[in-house]
Amino acid sequence: MQIPPILSAPLHMIPIPLIERICRLMFGRIAKAHPGLFERLDEHRQKRFAFLPTDLPLAFVVVPGRQEISVLRKPVEIEADAVTEAPLFLLLALMEGRCDADALFFSRDLSVTGDMEAMLAMRNALDASNIDLQKDLAKLAGPFAPVARRVIGEIRDRALKDQNSSAGEAAAWN
C-alpha cells in the first residue's frame, strides 16, 4: 500500500523539528518496550541506517548505539552505512516481522544498498524483538490507548492486506 500523494503532501510544509520530535517519541517508546533490540547488532550498533519511504518526502536515519533517529526532507544526500527503500507501510511491516524481506527484495518491492552485513544484523535484531507497533505505540495515547490500538490495528491490517494482494506470493510467502 502506497500513501497517496494527497496525504503525504502536508509533510512538505510541517517543520522537520516537529516531525522529528514525534518520531523520537515513537522511537523511544519502541526502544523502551524492547530494551535488547539494539544489543543484537554487536559491532554494527554505531552504524547509520537510513530508511527511505518511497511514498513520503522524508528520510529517517537511525544510529542504534546512540538510540538516535533523525528526520530529513528529501531530496537530500544521506550519509548512511546501509539504506533501505520501500513504501512506508512495507518498512513498518518489516519492522514487525510481518513480511518476508528476502521475497520483497527479490521481487524488487524493497531496495537495500550499502553494508549488507549491517542490514542483515538489523533485520535479525528486528525479527528477534517481536515488535508490535499497534501495542507499543498505542501506549503513547494514555487513556485513549484502547482506541488508538484499534485504529492502528485497522490501518495496519488494511495496509498489509493491500500489500499482500498487490505483491501476490512475494509478500505472502512468509
Image: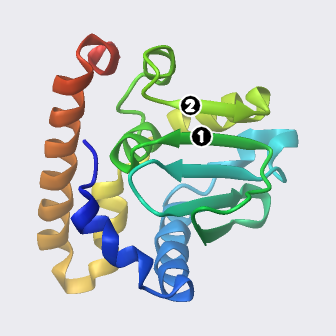
Q: CB of mark 2 within 8 Å of CB of mark 1? A: yes
Q: How many marks?
A: 2
Of the residues under marks 2 and 1, which one precedes in the sequence? Answer: 1
Q: Residue at 39% x, 75% y: name it.
A: 11
Quadrant for residue 82, please give it: top right
- What's the amino acid at mark 1? Thr
Q: As drawn, is 74 to the left or to the right of 63?
A: left
Q: Nearer the viewer, residue 143 or 106?
A: 106
- Residue 38 or residue 119, whichever sits in front: 119
Q: Which residue is mark 2?
A: 111
Q: Is residue 95 above or below residue 169?
A: below
Q: Disc 1 marks which residue? A: 84
Task: Relative to 20, say whether 18 is above or below.
Answer: below
Near mark 1 (Cα within 10 A), the count class, few <14, some 14-19 or many ≥20, is some
Q: Residue at x 43, y 77 (%)?
A: 12
Badge 2 local density, few (<14 within 10 Å), some, or many (20+)? some
- Percent position (x, y) of residue 170? 33, 15
Q: Amino acid at mark 2?
A: Ser
